[in-house]
Protein backbone atom coordinates (compact mmCIF):
# COMPACT_ATOMS: atom_id res chain seq x y z
CA UNK A 1 0.00 0.00 0.00
CA UNK A 2 2.81 2.41 0.85
CA UNK A 3 4.37 1.81 -2.58
CA UNK A 4 1.07 2.58 -4.34
CA UNK A 5 0.64 5.70 -2.24
CA UNK A 6 4.13 6.93 -3.13
CA UNK A 7 3.53 6.25 -6.84
CA UNK A 8 0.35 8.29 -6.65
CA UNK A 9 2.35 11.19 -5.25
CA UNK A 10 0.97 11.15 -1.70
CA UNK A 11 3.48 11.89 1.06
CA UNK A 12 1.34 11.46 4.13
CA UNK A 13 1.11 15.22 4.62
CA UNK A 14 -2.15 16.55 5.91
CA UNK A 15 -1.39 20.14 4.90
CA UNK A 16 -2.43 21.65 1.61
CA UNK A 17 0.48 24.00 0.86
CA UNK A 18 2.46 21.54 -1.22
CA UNK A 19 -0.61 20.20 -3.00
CA UNK A 20 -2.11 23.59 -3.80
CA UNK A 21 1.10 25.30 -4.83
CA UNK A 22 1.69 25.49 -8.55
CA UNK A 23 4.74 24.52 -10.53
CA UNK A 24 8.05 26.30 -10.05
CA UNK A 25 8.72 29.37 -12.22
CA UNK A 26 11.14 27.37 -14.39
CA UNK A 27 8.96 24.31 -14.92
CA UNK A 28 7.21 25.49 -18.10
CA UNK A 29 10.65 26.01 -19.62
CA UNK A 30 11.60 22.43 -18.71
CA UNK A 31 8.48 21.12 -20.43
CA UNK A 32 9.07 23.21 -23.55
CA UNK A 33 12.72 22.04 -23.61
CA UNK A 34 11.56 18.40 -23.45
CA UNK A 35 8.97 18.82 -26.24
CA UNK A 36 10.79 21.24 -28.59
CA UNK A 37 13.28 18.68 -30.03
CA UNK A 38 10.29 16.59 -31.13
CA UNK A 39 8.65 19.40 -33.11
CA UNK A 40 8.92 18.84 -36.84
CA UNK A 41 7.82 22.02 -38.61
CA UNK A 42 9.18 23.33 -41.85
CA UNK A 43 6.49 25.92 -42.49
CA UNK A 44 6.85 29.66 -42.36
CA UNK A 45 4.95 31.95 -40.02
CA UNK A 46 4.41 35.65 -39.81
CA UNK A 47 5.46 36.84 -36.41
CA UNK A 48 5.84 34.33 -33.58
CA UNK A 49 2.33 32.95 -32.91
CA UNK A 50 1.70 30.87 -29.80
CA UNK A 51 -0.14 27.57 -29.65
CA UNK A 52 -1.46 26.98 -26.12
CA UNK A 53 -1.86 23.34 -25.17
CA UNK A 54 -3.28 21.80 -22.02
CA UNK A 55 -1.32 18.68 -21.11
CA UNK A 56 -2.53 16.14 -18.55
CA UNK A 57 -0.23 13.55 -17.07
CA UNK A 58 0.15 10.91 -14.41
CA UNK A 59 2.22 11.69 -11.28
CA UNK A 60 5.04 9.75 -12.99
CA UNK A 61 5.04 12.25 -15.87
CA UNK A 62 3.51 9.92 -18.44
CA UNK A 63 1.37 12.04 -20.74
CA UNK A 64 -2.29 11.02 -20.70
CA UNK A 65 -3.62 13.61 -23.11
CA UNK A 66 -3.21 16.98 -24.72
CA UNK A 67 -5.72 19.49 -25.99
CA UNK A 68 -5.22 22.61 -28.05
CA UNK A 69 -6.73 25.39 -25.93
CA UNK A 70 -5.81 28.33 -28.17
CA UNK A 71 -4.70 28.05 -31.74
CA UNK A 72 -1.71 29.96 -33.03
CA UNK A 73 -3.67 30.65 -36.19
CA UNK A 74 -1.27 28.43 -38.13
CA UNK A 75 -2.80 24.96 -38.35
CA UNK A 76 0.49 23.34 -39.40
CA UNK A 77 2.24 24.73 -36.28
CA UNK A 78 -0.60 23.65 -33.98
CA UNK A 79 -0.51 20.13 -35.44
CA UNK A 80 3.30 19.96 -35.18
CA UNK A 81 3.14 20.88 -31.49
CA UNK A 82 0.46 18.27 -30.74
CA UNK A 83 2.46 15.55 -32.55
CA UNK A 84 5.60 16.57 -30.64
CA UNK A 85 3.82 16.18 -27.32
CA UNK A 86 2.71 12.70 -28.38
CA UNK A 87 6.31 11.84 -29.31
CA UNK A 88 7.62 13.16 -25.99
CA UNK A 89 5.52 10.69 -24.01
CA UNK A 90 6.70 11.74 -20.54
CA UNK A 91 7.09 15.12 -18.87
CA UNK A 92 10.07 15.95 -16.66
CA UNK A 93 9.62 16.29 -12.92
CA UNK A 94 9.57 19.71 -11.29
CA UNK A 95 12.21 20.68 -8.70
CA UNK A 96 10.04 19.23 -5.91
CA UNK A 97 9.76 15.88 -7.76
CA UNK A 98 6.14 16.36 -8.79
CA UNK A 99 4.65 16.59 -12.26
CA UNK A 100 1.87 19.21 -12.18
CA UNK A 101 -1.26 18.23 -14.06
CA UNK A 102 -3.04 19.63 -15.96
CA UNK A 103 -0.68 22.28 -17.32
CA UNK A 104 -1.23 24.98 -19.92
CA UNK A 105 1.94 25.41 -22.00
CA UNK A 106 2.61 27.90 -24.78
CA UNK A 107 4.78 26.95 -27.77
CA UNK A 108 6.15 29.47 -30.28
CA UNK A 109 8.04 28.55 -33.47
CA UNK A 110 10.76 31.19 -33.08
CA UNK A 111 11.55 30.74 -29.36
Image (cartoon, helix red, strand yellow):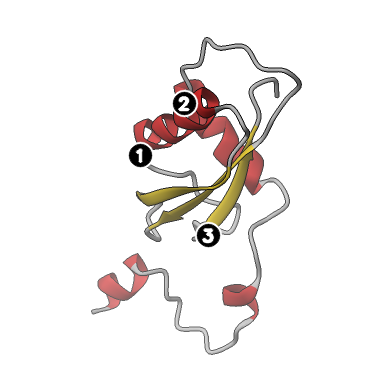
**Which residue sits furthest left?**
1
- The label shown at residue 73 is none
In three-dimensional space, the C-alpha distance between marks 2 and 3, rounded to whole angstroms, equals 23 Å
Report the side of 17 relative to 54 (left or right). Answer: right
Closer to the camera in the image, 56 or 34: 56
Report the side of 62 relative to 38 (left or right). Answer: left
Q: Mark 3 Cα within 10 Å, few/some/many (few <14, many 20+)?
A: many
Badge 3 element: loop
User: Looking at the picture, how far across and down is residue 109, in whole percent?
Assistant: 64, 22
Report the side of 4 relative to 52 (left or right). Answer: left
- Say whether disc 2 or disc 3 marks the residue closer to the N-terminus: 2
Badge 1 element: loop
Which residue position is annotated with label 1?
Answer: 89
In three-dimensional space, the C-alpha distance between marks 2 and 1, rounded to whole angstroms, equals 15 Å
Q: Nearer the viewer, mark 2 or mark 1?
A: 2
Say if 97 sits above or below 41 in the image.
below
Say if 6 sits above or below 35 in the image.
below
In three-dimensional space, the C-alpha distance between marks 1 and 3, rounded to whole angstroms, equals 15 Å
Occupied quadrant, residue 106? top right
Q: Mark 2 Cα within 10 Å, few/some/many (few <14, many 20+)?
A: some
Closer to the camera in the image, 76 or 5: 76
Say if 87 sits above or below 4 in the image.
above
Closer to the camera in the image, 1 or 48: 48
Say if 55 sits above or below 51 in the image.
below
Occupied quadrant, residue 49? top right
Q: Mark 1 Cα within 10 Å, few/some/many (few <14, many 20+)?
A: some
Which residue position is annotated with label 3?
Answer: 100
Which residue position is annotated with label 2?
Answer: 80
Amino acid sequence: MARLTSLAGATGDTGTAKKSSGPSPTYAGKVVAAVKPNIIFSGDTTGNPAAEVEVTSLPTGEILGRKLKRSSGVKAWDDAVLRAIDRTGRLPRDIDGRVPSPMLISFRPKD
